[in-house]
Image (tube, rainbow, N blue to C red):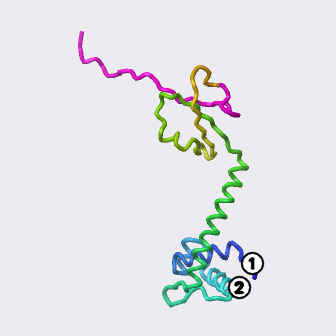
Amino acid sequence: MSINVDLDRLKSFVAVGEELHFTRAAQNRLHVSQPWLSRSVKSLEQKLGVQLFDRHSRHVELTPPGRRLLYGARKILHDFDRTVSAVVRDRKGNGHLTVGYSPYVDLRFMIERRSCSICVRNRVFMLSLVNCTFSSPTAPAGSRKIRAIAAPTPVFDRAPSSRMQ
């Protein structure tokens, strides 16, 4: 059995299901009129052939089918948002940054993962860490060139001398 449900109706249902109040969901979450929201949810109930809410004068309650649909609808909307974000992110062109590190640098917190992502100015970069020797730190690491290096720096005592001469 295939029933077409558009995302707007699903979003409307989720808003009412989370607020448990048509007026608050319409005004605060969806910025639509309450009558439009009521018609949208009623239309969804008719399409599905089930009652999703028990309506009372001041609030609504989810029915068992409503609770089940709310759980699934949240997942669907979340997955859809993630997919759209990935498509947009790919359109912008993500980058990859390979960082070479010295065995003397304590990067244990990152090395265990070997790769992660960072976000800079709304662009996502995959970050790979490669252990390298500093005899040739810019040599290709695998198929990628190292673009940054994490190396220890000397630590100088910058405190003013306590001895006056």
* Residue wearing tag 1: 4
Q: Earlier in the sequence, mark 1 or mark 2?
A: 1
Amino acid type, label 1 = Asn
Q: Nearer the viewer, residue 97 or 160?
A: 97
* Residue wearing tag 2: 47
Residue 164 at x, y percent in the picture: 23, 13
Q: Which residues are magenta?
A: 139-165
Residue 95 at x, y percent in the picture: 67, 41
Whether residue 67 appears in magenta in the rendering, the answer is: no
Left or right? Give the position of 87 relative to 111. Answer: right
- Write the residue at 48% across / 30% down: 105
Residue 142 at x, y percent in the picture: 68, 33
Residues packed near mark 1 inside 10 Å, few (<14), some (14 to 19) or many (20 plus): few
Query: Which SS does the magenta portion mostly show?
Result: loop
Measured along the vertical axis of the image, is residue 39 above or below residue 97?
Answer: below
Amino acid type, label 2 = Lys
- Write the residue at 68% across / 85% down: 48
Q: Nearer the viewer, residue 102 or 84?
A: 102
Q: Are marks 1 and 2 in contact (CB under 8 Å)?
A: yes
- Write the residue at 71% across / 74% down: 6
